[in-house]
Every structure is written in structure tokens, then in C-alpha cells.
Image (cartoon, rainbow, N blue to C red):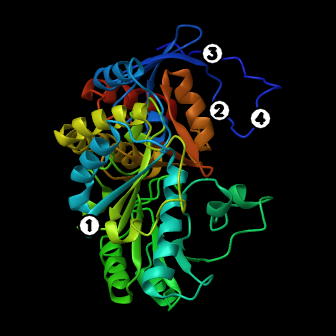
Amino acid sequence: MTAVQHEPLTTTVLAPNYHPLPVTITEGLGSWVTDTHGHRYLDLLSAYSALNFGHRHPALVAAAHAQLDRLTLTSRAFDHDLLLPFASRLAGLVGPLVAGEPMVLPMNTGAEAVETAIKAARKWGYDVKGVPDGRATIIVADGNFHGRTTTIVSFSSDPDARTGFGPFTPGFRRVPYGDAAALEAAIDDTTVAVLLEPVQGEQGVVVPPDDYLPAVRAACTRADVLLIADEVQSGLGRTGTTLACELWGVRPDLVTLGKALGGGIVPVSAVVGRADVLGVLTAGTHGSTFGGNPLACAVGLAVVDLLDTGEPQARGRVLGAHLGARLDGLVAAGMLRTVRRVGLWAGLDVEPTRPGGPTTGRELCERMLARGVLAKDTHGRTLRLAPPLTMTEEELDLAVDRLTDALA
């Protein structure tokens, strides 16, 4: 295809906390988006997995339209008719995959869900486990990404996320990701939880060794420590399963969900897990004006309907295998250095020494943009691919063909 030319974006009003590709999108449907010039692009980012079901999925749009005509917000000062049904259906979907009798606490963003899990774990540690007040610790992993709030960046190992935002919140211990022995050695009498991504998305789709999560689960059980799985990016079909933890047969005590739970329409997140843990958050101890609002619940219920069929998860497995075979071919041809993949989610490392090829992930994204494909770089030489689970095999092949041309 003829490469599309773009003018650099300039702005003086918008805060510069992002460095987007030079494209302005006006419309999206399924796997495709259209820009202000009428050019169409295949979306291989899916808004960091928030668009697992593609742009404007008809069932999700219909649910939102119907609810907009009835009720959009009550705040949690009052109940509404979709709050309990949403919590019940989500517990029915995710509850069998977590430890213990499930409870649901709805919030808005992924970072809010993680903050909620941190608060619940600390309070459970004080009220139930008996950790001395003010001394609770939580173990996290190097390379983590759980959001950008001041508490969360306090335990980030990314200098861009941390630098200039101290003083940092205490109470966290960071250990190498994938090293279960180091994690268990860090547990002591003050440890209330371990907070991990089953697959590190922002880091470049880093998949741990197969024995890692089962060993972490066993260590947490031995020490009476909560295992919190951050599945904001990895959950709800992305890895070919409802939760990524299923891939290793691990049941966390709490799981944080977000992004795809809102269907790409509204921000929806939740913490799902043990009722004896979330139950420590009594009236006044935690809340959100918009958490579990009627519009969010309507869309969330429609998302659960889609996942209940198992079709999105199955598409993640089938399309993921197809994508993996194509990407492995690019590695074998020397066009990429390495590929990491799980389900329909891949991290690609650019081969910077290849003559004529891109030397950075950003350069590769810009080349793909010119060929009608949207993707996002991370950490210098890495590219993340997270196509919609609704993408067709033909669309996926077209996207990889254009990726190949961009590499060449």
C-alpha cells in the first residue's frame, strides 16, 4: 500500500504527559479506525486491552444506549437496579477462579482497583492477621506496572514513573520478577500480601517461568499472605483464558480487573476475591462516587455476557497461535530479535543491528503507522501487540504483512 504521510501534532493547551503517534482518530468500528484525513488503520493496540472486543461492539453499544435512556448515576449513597446483578454476574464468572467465597467491589480505573486491593490487604493484615498497626508490608516485583498514582509509583522500578514524584509511600518490598525463591525470602511477619502481574504487559509482555506462579501461591499459603493478581491488562480473554492465572492453575486471593470490563465505552474496574478480605472494608472506610454506576454496570453486564460464552477466550487462543507462527517466522528470518507471546498478546524486540531495519520500537511504530497499522512501543526497542479478540484471521494476516513490510 502507499505509505500515509502525517504532519506532527503540536499543542500548547494539553499537558504533555503523553507522546502519541502523529495521528488523530475520529471513528472506529471492529478492528479498524479512521483518522481526520479519512485514512483507515488496523488497531493492534486495543487501548492496552481495553478494547478486547473491538471498537463499538454492537452488544456493548446497545447496552450503553439503553441505559443512557434510563439512569446514569446515583452515587453509592443509594442502590440501583443493576448494581447487585452486575456484582453477582461478575462473581459468577471470576469467583470460581479465585480462592474462597467471592465478593466484588466495583471501582472505575485499573489503578483504583489496585489501590483498593492494597487498602483491603493492609486492613485485613491489621484486623485479621494481627500485624502491628502501621507496619504492614506488601511484596511487589521489578518491572511492575500497576498504575501511576503516588502510592503505586512508590514501588515502581521505572525511573520515568518515579522521578520527581517523591516522597514515596513506604510499606513495599520489590524482588526480581520470576524468582519465587527471592520472593519467599522477602516474606516476614509484617507481610500481608504479594502483588503481581501474572504477565507483565507494560514491560513488554514478559511471561514468567511455568513454575513461578504456582510456587508463589504455595509460599503465600504457607505464610498466610494474600496473593493479589493484577489482571487489569491480562484478564478477560486477552491470554486465551478468562484470567491469565488459569494458565498455571493458580487461584489468587484477590484479582484486580479493569480496561476490557468497560468494553471500551466507559471506565469500569473491580476487585474480586475472598469475602473475608474485602469484607473488612466497611461503610466509610473506602468508596467511589462513580464506582458501580448504572451505566458502568450495564456495559459490564454485557461484557460478562460475551465472556460467559467462552468465544472471546477461544478466539484469543486460536488467533494467538496464528499470530505466534507468523511472528516466529520473522524471528527466524532475522527481522526481529525475540518475541514473547501468550494468547493474543505479544512483545516484539527490534533487531537494531539489521541494516535498513528500525532501530527502536518507536521507529517501527512510525513505519507501521505509515502503512495503516497502529501499535505502541515500550522501553526503547520493544513493541506490544494486543489486537482485538474480534479480529478476523484475514485482518490479522494483513496486519502482519504490513508489519513485515515495515521491518523490511
Instruction: Residue 277 in the image: state x and y as whole percent.
Output: 39, 70
Using a 10 Å C-alpha cutoff, classify the residue at mark 1 as few (fewer than 14 neighbours), some (14 to 19) or many (20 or more): some
Q: For the residues marked 1 and 3, what is the alpha-carbon distance in whole angstroms?
A: 45 Å
Is label 3 in a helix, a strand or a loop?
loop
CB atoms of marks 1 and 4 within 8 Å:
no
Is label 1 in a helix, a strand or a loop?
helix
Using a 10 Å C-alpha cutoff, classify the residue at mark 2 as few (fewer than 14 neighbours), some (14 to 19) or many (20 or more): few
Residue on which the image places disc 4: 15
Up-down relation of residue 68 to residue 78 (above or below) = above
Which circle, 1 or 4, is nearer the viewer? 4
Task: Place residue 359 in its image quadrant.
Answer: top right
Mark 3 belongs to which amino acid?
Answer: Gln
Instruction: Residue 355 in the image: state x and y as whole percent.
Output: 58, 41
Residue on which the image places disc 3: 5
In terms of sequence position, does the residue under pointer 4 or pointer 2 come before the other? 4
Mark 2 belongs to which amino acid?
Answer: Pro
